[in-house]
Image: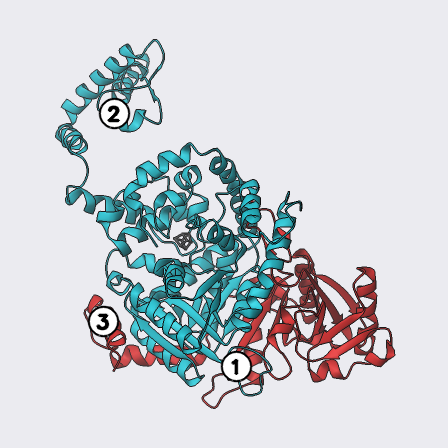
Chain colours: A red, B cyan
Amino acid sequence: MNPSRDQILGSIRRSFRRGPLAPEALAACETRLVTHRRNLIPERARTLPPRGQVELFVTMAEAVNATVTRVKDARDVPAAIAEYLARFNLPQRLVRAPDPVLDELPWSGRPLLETRRGVAEDSDLVGVTACFAAIAETGTLMLHSGAAGPTRNNFLPDTHIAVVRGDQVVAAYEDGWDRLRAARGGADGGVAMPRTVNFITGPSRTADIEQKIELGAHGPRRLHIVLVEDGEAS
Amino acid sequence: MKVTSQAFKANARHALGDPNLQKAMTNLRSGFVERRAHAVSQLPEWEALRDEAVAIKKHTLAQLDFYLEEFERRVVANGGKVHWCRDAAEANAAVLAICRGLGARTVTKGKSMIGEEMGVNDYLEANGVTPVETDLGEYIIQIRHEPPSHIIAPAIHLVKEQIAQSFRETHRDLDPARQLKDSRQMCDEARAVLRPRFLAADVGITGANFLVAETGSSIIVTNEGNGDLTQTLPKAHVVLASLEKVVPTLEDAATILRLLARSATGQEFSTYTTVSTGPRRPDDPDGPGEYHVVLLDNGRSALLGGEFEDMLRCIRCAACLNHCPVYQAIGGQSYGWVYPGPMGSVLTPSLIGVDQAGDLPNASTFCGRCEEVCPMKIPLPRMMRHWREREFQRHLPPRAYRLGLAAWAFFARRPALYRVAADWAARMLGYVGRARGRFRALPLAAGWTRTRDLPAPEGRSFMSLWAARQSASRSAQ
Ligand code: SF4
C-alpha cells in the first residue's frame, strides 16, 4: 500500500466531510470523462466556411512571426522550400521527418537541395515536417509523435518548415482533438494518445530580458509554413 | 526554498531604494499590462470563458479525489508512474530516487513553481546531481543564486547590464572581449551554452500547467521551447505538479488555455503547448523511456472545503502580480517565498503558516485590480482580508495598532461622538499643518509617514462640511 496516496485522498475527503464519491456523483463524473462535452468555443473561427478558416489560419500564423507560402499542388513543395531557403540565405540542406506524406514529394527534382530522412541531430539547421492539423483560431500547428514524427525534429533545427494541406485546417483546438480521436480511437471510446502532441504557434521566443521579445530562444528561430491549397475542402 | 517572508517590511524598504529594480519594474506596464489588455479586447467571449473556466475548476475541486485517481489510472495504463507526495521532503526524495535509478549526473529543468516550492535544485545538488535551469529567466537567477521575482518572468527585477555581468562571470570560457550589449546577444549566448546541456542531461524535469484525467496527460505551456527539449532528449521525463492542476478532459484544458496565455503575456496562445502522455512508445524514434508524475499536496488538500478553497483555482498566470500597485513598487523577492503579489499574499500564509507570512496579506491597497484581472475570478482581496482578520484574532499586530483600532471602534459605535471627534481632529491637524500643507512625521502614525507624507486636512471633516452645505442649500431655497 502507498501511505501517502491514502493520506492525501483521505485528507481531501476529510476536508469535504465525506467518504469516496456517492454513486450518483461518481456516475456524473464518469460520464463527463467519456462524452468530451465541448465548452464555449469562440465565434471567431467556428462560424467560418473552410476557405475562411484557411485565411484566418494564415493571418494568425503571420501575426506571430511565422511565414507562409502557398502552393497549388503538393508537387510544388520542394521548389517552394528551396526558394524559401535561398531567400533567407539558408543552406540548401535539410532533415525531413520520416513521414510518408513527405516521402511522396518529388525531392529529386531539386538536385541542389540535399535532404536526409530521419531524426534531427543538433547539427541539422533546417528541418521539414508534416503536421496532423492546423488550428485557425490562433494560427497553431498540431503535430504528434510517432514513427513518422520524431519530436526532436520540431525543436532542434534553427529553421522549422511545416507542410500543411488546406483540408488539415480546422477551426478550434477541440476540432483537432476530435480528429485525433477519429484517427486513433481507443477501445473504450477514448483516444490512444501519442506520447506527445505539440501545438506550435510561431517560432520560439522569450521576453525574459527586460521584457523585450527575441525570437529563437531554444527552439527554432524561424517557422515557415508551406500551405498546399489543392488539399483544401471546398 | 528559504523563507524570508517574516522580513517582508525590511525587504520591501530595501526594494524601494534599489535603482536597478525600480528601473526594471517599469517594463511591467508596457509589457504585460498593455499586451494583456489588447489580447482581451480581441476576444468578445472573454467574460463567458472566465465563467466556464471557474465552473470547470469548481467541479473538479469538489471531486478532486475522483479525478486524481482517474488521472493516475490512465498514467499507469500508458506506462507512466504517479508518485503521491504529502510534502516537499517526500517529493524531493521521489525525484532523487528516479535520478539514482538512472545513474543521472545532470538534469535539465523547465521552469516549475512546484520545483521552487520543493527547493528541488538545492536538494539535488546536495545529493550529487547537477540541476540546470533552461528557461532563460530561470537560468539567469540560477547563475546569480537568487530566488525568482515573478512566477512567469523570474528575472524581471533585473536590468540587462546586471545580466550581462552575470554571463561574463559564469561563461568564463568565452571570449572576454565579446559584446553583450543587448538582449539579442545574451539570448544567443544562453542558447549556445545550454544546447549541449540539453543533449547531455540524463533526466528532464518540467512542471505542469494541467493534468488531464481523461487521458493521463500533463500539459506544459512555454514560449522558448526549453520545456520540450527538456522532456524529449533525456532518458526520463519527470513532471512536478500539485494536486489542483488536474482537469477532467482535453476540452476543459482547451477552455482554460484560452485564458492562460492572454492573461499571462497577452499572447493569443503561447508558442508551445505540449501534451505529454507516458513514455516513448515502441515505434517512437525518440522521447524519454520513463514518465513520472510527482504529485505534491503540501497543504493543499487541507484548503479544500474552507475559505481558501477558491485559491486552488489559480492557474499561475501572474496577471494579479502585474496589475498590483504594491508588487509593481517592490518586486517579487520582497515577499520572501515562492509566490509573490496578491496570489502569494493569500497562498503563502496558507502553505507555510501565517506566523511566518503574516505581513503579506497587509501588502495590499485593496484597490481590487487583482480580482478584476484574475481569469479564474479568485476573490483575492476578500481572502487577504480573511488572513488579516485571523492574524488580528491571534493578536499578532503590535500593541499600538490594536489600541488605535480599539479607540476607533469606541467612536465608530457612537456616531454623534465620532462626528465631533473627527471634526475636531481634522481642524487640529489642519491648523497645525497649515504652513506646509503636509506632515513629514506624526506621533503614532510613523508607519505611514516613514515612507510617505500625510497631507494636512483642509480644516473640517467631510461630515461637518456636508452638514454645513445641506443647511446652506436649504436656506437658499
Ligand atoms: S490568482 Fe488569478 S490572476 Fe493571480 S496568478 Fe492566479 S489565476 Fe492568475
- Residue at the disc numbered 3: A13
What chain letter is assigned to the residue under label 2?
B
Q: Are marks 1 and 2 on the same chain?
A: yes
Residue closest to the eye, B153 or B463: B153
Q: Can the viewer see residue A170?
A: no
Q: Chain of mark 3?
A: A
Q: Is residue B142 above or below residue B326?
A: below
Q: Secondary structure at mark 2?
A: loop
Q: Is residue B133 left or right of residue A75?
A: left
For the image, the number of numbered tags is 3
Q: Is residue B321 left or right of residue B190?
A: left
Task: Find residue B445 and name its label.
Answer: 2
Q: Earlier in the sequence, mark 1 or mark 2?
A: 1
The amino acid type, in three-letter code, at marker 3 is Arg
Q: For the point 58% across and 74% down, which residue is it? A: A176
Q: Residues within 10 Å of mark 3 (few under 14, many from 20)?
A: many
In the picture of the structure, the residue carrying the numbered disc 1 is B280
The disc label shown at residue B200, or none: none
Where the N terminus of chain B falls, by quadrant? bottom left
State the SS at label 3.
helix
The quadrant of the image that shows the C terminus of chain B is top left
Q: Is residue A193 left or right of residue B98?
A: right
From the image, state whether disc 1 or disc 2 is nearer to you: 1
